[in-house]
Image (tube, rainbow, N blue to C red):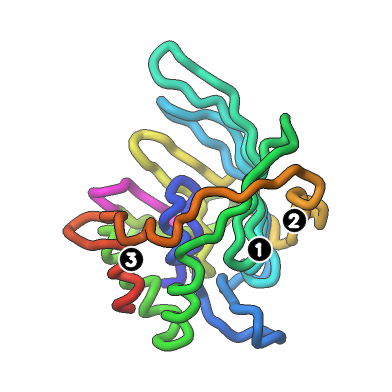
Amino acid sequence: MKASMFPLGVLIVAATCGGVATADDSTPMLHPVEKVCITYESSGQMMNGTTLRCHRDYGYEMFEIEDMTIGIGGFSQTQKAHRVTIGDQIYAVDPDTNTGTQTTNPIYEPIVNAVTQNGSDSVSDAFLSAMGYTSTGQTQMVAGLACTIYNSQMIGTACLTEDGLALEQTVLGNVMTATSVVYEPGEDQNYRRHETAEITQGPDLSNGLNGIDIGNGVNLGDLLNQQ
């Protein structure tokens, strides 16, 4: 199973890889779908709003535009974000202030290496297993597409298509559901949003993986290294 980046689980970016051969061998193939745009609706106790997530070049370039209302109890706040991912670089831009940060994705290199050495299925299957996701055997229709429901006691549920698109995920009572799926890359300017913003260096996450326990005594950094 080649899973895409889950809407509510940033760490599951490790399961996005789908292969490593493209027309340009220097550019890894990070998703089996060449180009796609998915619009999500989020609802739950902690967040409500919309997310537009698009990628092109088999996931090597991606952008995500969020417009959320986040709240706990009587407190709520509107949060807008525009994130661009190009290879191992993540740019997080606040569109209201036109400022942002640039961060190196610590998951990128070990995932590409693992796929190169062992093939994509070994990485995605191992990661889904470590996160406790198992197929329920049930399918449903979301945004006009069929997807298979996976369940994890640690995280919640997710519904994935055959070509690795996450159409729905439930985490801690918050549900993110696809309302539209278009096999187009989206506007080029959204992949370049960081070029017109004031960007500063973000936090160093290079050692962050080894401190991430993803359950059942499994460490994210160890999992990727083993694979």
Q: Are marks 2 and 1 in contact (CB under 8 Å)?
A: yes
Give the quadrant of the C terminus. Answer: bottom left
> On the image, numbered disc 2 is attached to which residue?
191
Q: Residue at x 31, y 61 (%)?
A: 210
Q: Residue at x 49, y 73 (%)?
A: 109
> On the image, numbered disc 1 is attached to which residue?
86
Q: CA distance from mark 3 to mark 2?
A: 29 Å
Q: Report the number of discs.
A: 3
Q: Residue at x 37, y 41 (%)?
A: 171
Q: Position of residue 211 (x, y in %)?
A: 30, 55
Q: Is residue 20 above or below residue 152?
A: below
What segment is highlighted magenta in the picture? Answer: 152-160
Q: Nearer the viewer, residue 105 or 56?
A: 105
Taking the image as shown, residue 214 lies to the left or right of residue 34, namely left
Residue 141 appears in the rendering? no
Residue 1 appears in the rendering? yes
> On the image, numbered disc 3 is attached to which residue?
221
